[in-house]
Each structure stands twice: as structure tokens, then as C-alpha cells.
Image (tube, rainbow, N blue to C red):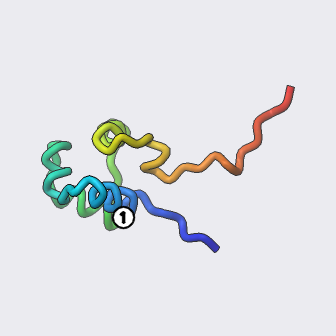
Amino acid sequence: MSRRVRFGDNIKILRSRNKMTQQDLADKLHVARQTISAWQEGIGKPDIYMLADLSAIFGVTTDYLLSVSYTHLTLPTT
């Protein structure tokens, strides 16, 4: 069974790839460092507007941040 990647894991990975500390990201988003820590620990989640900001900062889609996969969906045939 594969392990589902959590939102917080994605944030931590993206921060690391971009050589950013929690404080660096917090400063860009105008939030407290503890907010970033809470997201990474799965204690809290950002609102939808913050998701858009995060995707812009890291250059990824919101689907990527949320680990959304559409491989299980089938399109209707016409």
C-alpha cells in the first residue's frame, strides 16, 4: 500500500528544495513561523487564498500542494 503524502509533507519538501526556512516562508506569506510549523505537523491548514499564494511561491499547482490525483476518474463518453 502506498503512503499518501500529506499537505504538510509537501510544504516541507518544497521549502527544502527552495532552501527556505519556516521563517522565510512565513515572512513571504505574512504569517507567524508557528503557522508554517502547524501546517507541516498537520495541526492546521491554510485557507484557500493562502493556497493560491503558496502555489505561486513554489511554482506548483494547488492540486500538487494538496496531493490531488485524478487518475481514478473516468471521463464520460459521448
Location of residue 17 in the rendering, given as x and y in whole percent from the top left corner: 30, 57
Quarter assignment of residue 55 = top left
Farthest bottom residue?
A: 1
Residue kind at label 1, given as amino acid type: Gly
For disc 1, the neighbor class at 10 Å (few under 14, some 14 to 19, many from 20) is few
Q: Quadrant of the C terminus?
A: top right
Q: Residue at x 20, y 56 (%)?
A: 20
Which residue in the structure is indicated by mark 1? 42
Q: Quadrant of residue 16?
A: bottom left
- Residue drawn 26% across and 53% down? 18
Lateral position of residue 26 relative to residue 73, left or right: left
Relative to 45, 36 lies left or right:
left
Q: How many marks?
A: 1
- The residue at the point 47 percent across, 48 percent down is 64
x%, y% of residue 65? 42, 49
Percent coordinates x, y for residue 77 in the rendering: 84, 31
Residue that protrudes farthest toward the right in the picture = 78
Residue 54 spot, x, y in % from top left = 31, 43
Left/right of residue 19 with respect to residue 10 in the rendered view:
left
Q: Secondary structure at mark 1?
A: loop
**Is residue 7 found left or right of 74 in the rendered image?**
left
> Which residue does the image show at 38% across and 63% down from the upper left?
9
Quadrant position of the N terminus in the picture: bottom right
